[in-house]
Image: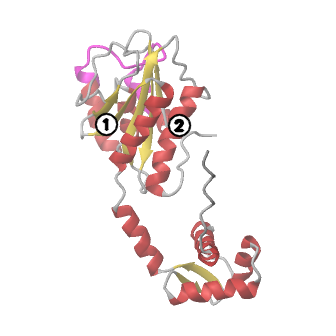
């Protein structure tokens, strides 16, 4: 039996300086020395020494002579971090974990201009019979991921796709067993956008439930949509269910990795 490795030692003063930077970065307005020292449990004189060093290195700036905000060096770090982020790879890694934790069929889609394109597909240990696989282009109205993208499109492009669908499709879109007329589609998509998810309950595939949630970039645009599906008898995707929360945690985690903060997905 080996002894447990000792806890790694760091540089305490560096950690305090980073705590100050983190506090400034999330503060609703530039904090004062008094606010910083109180929030971080530092004496004003000690906090001031850290602020002087951060000012010298350009990580913070002083405004109004008494307040502190992030400086150019912090901006450079942030831009460099953004350049190194790969949203697709992060979505792939999150999907691997979701598939392993839930043993459900899962997928990642991106918007190709006309509809969702499946760029990753992982089956459960008990594959379900669906005519969708890697590389498939899904309907913007008749897929859960498609409705999420559609709900976030600019009005003109959304209108073009919706009008085309209603002119060409033989059957109306469905939701919870009911047809969606052209007049009812707008409010339905607004709900999808507000709630941050779209769920099908055997609406298109008999006895199969589908749940899709978006991953956002720092501008609030959707970069990918993560989808989970399974037989309705063992795939409870109602809001608040275990599977619902797993998909929510997955999409929020990737958004957090991309943006540095969690975008609120569920209203309320």
The residue identified by callout 1 is 159
Quadrant of res 126: top left
Rendered view: 132 above or below 161: above
Q: Position of residue 12 (x, y in %)?
A: 64, 74
Residue 255 visible (yes or no): yes
Query: Mark 1 to mark 2: distance in Å?
Result: 28 Å
Image: magenta residue range: 166-189
> Residue 205: x percent and y percent?
37, 13
Q: Residue 170, percent across and down?
A: 26, 14
- Position of the C terminus by quadrant: top right
- Whether residue 195 is visible to the viewer of this picture, yes or no, is no
Proximity of marks 1 and 2: CB atoms separated by less than 8 Å = no
Q: Disc 1 vs disc 2: which is toward the camera?
A: 2
Which quarter of the rendering shows the N terminus?
A: top right
Q: Who's the residue at 28% across and 22% down the image?
A: 132
Question: Which residue, as the protein is rendered here, is positioned at the far front?
Answer: 1
Nearest to N terminus: mark 1 or mark 2? 1
Does residue 256 sit above or below 42 in this rendering? above
Q: Residue at x 54, y 33 (%)?
A: 246
């Amino acid at each position: 039996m080996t002894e447990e490795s000792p806890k790694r030692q760091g540089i305490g003063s560096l950690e305090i300086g980073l705590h100050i930077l983190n506090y400034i970065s999330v503060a609703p307005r530039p904090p004062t020395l008094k606010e910083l020292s109180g929030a971080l449990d530092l004496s004003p004189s000690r906090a001031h020494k850290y602020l002087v060093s951060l000012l010298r290195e350009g990580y913070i700036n002083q405004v109004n002579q008494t307040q502190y905000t992030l400086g150019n060096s912090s901006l450079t770090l942030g831009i460099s971090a953004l350049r190194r982020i790969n949203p697709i790879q992060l979505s792939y890694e999150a999907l691997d974990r979701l598939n392993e934790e839930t043993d459900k069929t899962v997928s990642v889609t991106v918007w190709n201009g006309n509809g969702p394109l499946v760029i990753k597909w992982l089956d459960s240990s008990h594959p379900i019979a669906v005519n969708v696989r890697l590389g498939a282009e899904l309907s913007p109205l008749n897929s859960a991921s498609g409705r999420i993208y559609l709900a976030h499109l600019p009005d003109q492009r959304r209108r073009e796709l919706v009008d085309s669908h209603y002119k060409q499709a033989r059957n109306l879109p469905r939701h919870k067993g009911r047809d969606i007329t052209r007049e009812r589609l707008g409010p339905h998509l607004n709900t999808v956008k507000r709630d941050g998810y779209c769920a099908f309950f055997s609406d298109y595939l008999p006895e199969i439930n589908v749940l899709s949630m978006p991953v956002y970039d720092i501008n609030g645009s959707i970069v990918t949509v993560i989808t989970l599906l399974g037989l309705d008898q063992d795939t409870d995707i109602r809001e608040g269910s275990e599977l619902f929360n797993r998909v929510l945690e997955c999409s929020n985690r990737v958004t957090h990795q991309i943006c540095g903060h969690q975008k609120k997905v569920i209203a309320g």
